[in-house]
Image: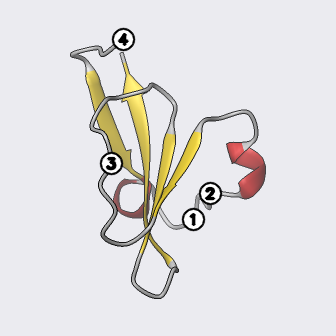
Amino acid sequence: MQNNNCRQLDVTREIPRSVPLTLRELTGRRVRVVPFGALITQEFIGGRVTIYLNQQNLVRNVVVETCD
C-alpha cells in the first residue's frame, strides 16, 4: 500500500559521514540492490533500503524509504 507521506532519505547525502551505515543495521530490513541501468518499480515501502550500484558494481548511492 502506497502512502502519500512517503519519501526517500538519501543516506549518502543527508546523513553525516560520522554516522556510518553498517550491514548490522540492515538486519531485518527489506533491502534491494539495483545494478547500473536497471529498471525498478517506484512504489514506497517504509524502511526499505535501496542500494544503487555503478557500472563497476560498486555502491553509488544508498536510499532509505520512510513513511510518516
Q: Quadrant of residue 29?
A: top right
User: Label 2, on which residue?
Assistant: 21
Q: Are marks 1 and 2 in contact (CB under 8 Å)?
A: no
- Image point 73% across, 56% down: which residue? 23
Q: Under tag 1, what secondary structure?
A: loop
The residue tagged 3 is 40
CA separation, marks 3 and 2? 23 Å
* Quarter residue 55 falls in: bottom left
Q: Amino acid at mark 4?
A: Met
CA gap, disc 1 to disc 4?
34 Å
Kindly identify the residue that appears in the image at 32 percent across and 40 percent down.
8
Disc number at residue 18?
Answer: 1
Cα distance in 3D space between marks 1 and 3:
30 Å
Which element type, helix, strand or loop, lies under badge 2? Answer: loop
Residue 62 on image: x %, y %: 45, 58
Mark positioned earlier in the residue sequence (3 or 2): 2
Amino acid type at circle 2 is Leu
- Label ID, residue 1: 4
Tell us which disc is closer to us: 3 or 2: 3
Residue 21: percent from the left, percent from the top? 62, 57
Query: Which element carries disc 3, helix, strand or loop?
Result: loop
**C-alpha gap between disc 4 and disc 2:** 27 Å
Mark 1 to mark 2 CA distance (whole Å): 10 Å
